[in-house]
Amino acid sequence: MNDILIVDRLTLRRGNFLLEDVSLSVSEQEIVALIGKTGAGKTVLLETIAGFNKPDCGSVLYQGREIASIPIEQRNIGYLYQDYSLFPYMTAGKNIGYCLKMRGCPRQEIRRQVLEMAERFGITGILQQYPGTLSGGEQQRVALARALMMRPRLLILDEPFSALDPVTKRRLYGMIREIRDQFECSILFVTHDFQEAQELADRVGVLIGGKLQGIVASSDLFRADWNDNTRVFLGLEESS
């Protein structure tokens, strides 16, 4: 497979926090998960990969180009924040169609594409509702629909299921692989949940204190030859 994303020795300092010498890749139509505790640098890494932060050292190549050299409107990356970041004063339908409106798409075409996307996610009945009236699962599907409106080649998800109840989580897990298959995109997501990472991802990386400890096949997460700190984090041995 070809790599759609290559992160090479990325280093970024934010105050006292250091994201240090991170290297990883994501292949076309691959799902990669990053796991780590709060404060490990997961969100900072995602934002830097998306081009929102300029690294102090290293590079982020997206489709063979340095991400910072690609205008934001041409990056073709979908980004879903942990809190979904829906516009509270817009209906669900207008949230989904917002990026098309910003690109000057005709109103009739926006309506057509929003309805088509809503049908994919089973949310046609809530298009006229505002985010504050929606459940967590409904908000997530609206946010995913919005992120996918531009048919991104890379979809980045920051703790996509953390705020959902267990039943809703299970219902939406299947949607991730469906999105990958239907939209032919790669997916990079972060999570605290080891089981979630194993179940959804092709490969899983462990981030501890701003350092990527490695990336392995999801089936090897608990049997790879990790260092002592990573083994403690994964619960494979007790801390000394």
Image: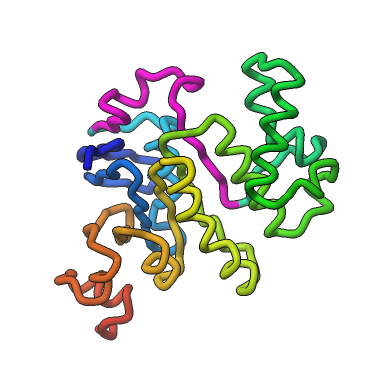
At 64% from the left and 45% from the top, the residue drawn is: 143
Query: Which quadrant, please, contains the C terminus?
Result: bottom left
At 71% from the left and 29% from the top, the residue drawn is: 112
- In depth, the one of 118 and 235 nearer the eye is 118
In the image, residue 189 lies at what x, y percent?
A: 43, 52
State the count of labels. 0
The colour scheme used here is: rainbow
- In depth, the one of 232 and 199 nearer the eye is 199
- In depth, the one of 103 and 82 nearer the eye is 103
Query: Which quadrant, please, contains the N terminus?
Result: top left
Question: In the rendered view, would you say 105 is above or below 98?
Answer: above
In the image, residue 35 lies at what x, y percent?
A: 38, 61
Question: In the rendered view, would you say 6 is above or below 173?
Answer: above
- In depth, the one of 18 and 81 nearer the eye is 81
- Quadrant of the image occupied by residue 224: bottom left
Residue 70 falls inside the magenta stretch:
yes
Residue 128 falls inside the magenta stretch:
no
At 76% from the left and 46% from the top, the residue drawn is: 124
Highlighted range, magenta: 59-82
In the image, residue 131 lies at what x, y percent?
A: 78, 47
At 45% from the left and 61% from the top, the residue drawn is: 191
**Horizontal arrangement in the rendering, residue 145 relative to residue 198 (left or right):** right
Question: In the rendered view, would you say 186 is above or below 196?
Answer: above
In the image, residue 23 lies at what x, y percent?
A: 22, 45
**Horizontal arrangement in the rendering, residue 123 relative to residue 8 (left or right):** right
- Quadrant of the image occupied by residue 102: top right
